[in-house]
Image (cartoon, coloured by chain):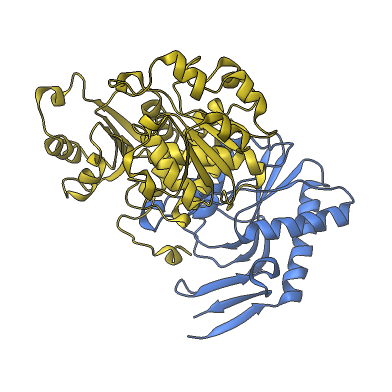
Chain colours: A yellow, B blue
Amino acid sequence: MRHLLDTKTLSREDALRILDVAEDMRDTQSREVKKLPTLRGKTVVNLFFEDSTRTRISFEAAAKRLSADVINFSAKGSSVSKGESLQDTAQTLQAMGADAVVIRHGASGAPHTLATSGWISAGVVNAGDGTHEHPTQALLDAFTMRKRRFGDDSRGRDLDGLKVAIVGDILHSRVARSNVWLLHTLGADVTLVAPPTLVPQDVSAWPVRIVYDLDQAVDAGPDAIMMLRIQLERMNAAYFPTEREYSRRWGLDPARLGRLPDGSMVLHPGPMNRGLEISADAADSPRSTVLEQVANGVSVRMAALYLLLAGERDSGNAEENAQ
Amino acid sequence: MSTRTVLHEADISRALTRISHEILESNKGPDDLVLLGIPTRGVTLAARIGALLADISGTPVPVGALDVTMYRDDLHRNPTRTPQPTQIPAGGIDGKTVVLVDDVLFSGRSIRAALDALQDIGRPAAVRLAILVDRGHRELPIRPDFVGKNLPSARSERVNVHLAEVDALEEVTIES
């Protein structure tokens, strides 16, 4: 694997490979010494043009657990705020010897530009770009669902037939997009639930069902329900009348939580708006996978960095030669 | 290119039985033993030796797997390797005598990686090495404690271990 830019073009084989390597990474995280020497001498740059705490910390933890050196670069207070272009920033990082660049950018497609421009030779990991994709989030969600469903027997399994409902602001959500493509690749059956104003226009081309009523989706008995964060900073138009109304119609309140089938799980990418899209009861219930998602995020990102950085450069798919 | 069979099914089985007796003899019984196989075929061999040890001594011996991929020193020289699961038996390895089991001992670099991996998991009282085939050409000061067969080979030759559980046939061949 050279880059990890999206889940739309990620093959089933590659997706399962990342998830299976993440299982091995997860196992190492329960050891006495959590650090592996695997990426010693490699440099990972976290290039964050948008604010992010958990994704950046998660990538930082993942890189450090693999013994890579981490350089954090955030746009605030850096040369970017002085007007430096993406190209100049990238070339500076290249000159410093970055082996991988983890990029979050407000513009959809920025990681793709970075990966294909020829400005840098480093591997590029998309950590969220505009309203396009956030592939490692989808991978950690899939990992969490697989782990809950199959337990220790999860290696090599996909999510065939798993019923997943994704609820909330689909329009602005790169997490929803990445999840739709990955879950579809892994064989899950995806339903999107949102107010009509928060459903994107191009949604007819997606491999999903759309429902506008959360009660209907809950009564359909999903195996997993993923509550997206209402990003109040993006609610600049009148997508819904009030937060209270949103919460009442599309929030996971205790009554809806109680109607979910036994063994179903509640996911949230965090940070949660308790009382808005998810009630405290749901967030703290045993069904909630929120903290597992955070822990699994480190394992999945370790797997992605390992697959990007550990092997020979530009090796293509000469996997057989390794034997 | 010629291929020659150096160990047949019966030879492999005899070698493993002898290794099992040697392990029990040097450890003065089955107490505090932990067998860890190195994937892929070391895991199979460890399981077989574990069964033999239990048969001979009447006490079950914990068997696990130790993946060394993350500790290799040649990762950047080869295409990305997919790690295999590591399984440490429930009792852990602290204070135990760990016997590492692998199919072929060549440069010794896998064993060096295994020793590093062990260090991150716990602190065994002693670490021993059991090998089905020792083909020489060591690049590190590592030697086996229990050897199925010493097989003098040229560096350019290839030694292939086939085990019934993994390969559907059972033999050790040398290719030149």
Quadrant of residue A46 within the rendered picture: top left
Quadrant of residue A109 within the rendered picture: top left
Q: Say above or below: B107 vs B162.
A: above
Q: Residue at x 79, y 47 (%)?
A: B61
Question: Is residue A158 found left or right of A198 in the rendered image?
Answer: right
Q: Residue furthest bottom?
A: B2
How many marks do you count on the picture?
A: 0
Q: Residue furthest right?
A: B58
Q: Residue at x 66, y 41 (%)?
A: A151
Q: Residue at x 38, y 17 (%)?
A: A241
Q: Position of residue A36 (x, y in %)?
A: 48, 38
Quadrant of residue A203 within the rendered picture: top left
Q: Is A314 in front, or is A274?
A: A274
Q: Is B122 in front, or is A275?
A: A275
Residue B152 visible to the viewer: no
Q: Say above or below: B175 vs A217.
A: below
Q: Residue at x 23, y 35 (%)?
A: A107
Q: Is B143 in front, or is A93?
A: A93
Q: Is A286 in front, or is A90?
A: A286
Residue B170 visible to the viewer: yes
Q: Position of residue A79 (x, y in %)?
A: 13, 25
Question: Is residue A230 found left or right of A266 in the rendered image?
Answer: left
Q: Position of residue B126 (x, y in %)?
A: 67, 41
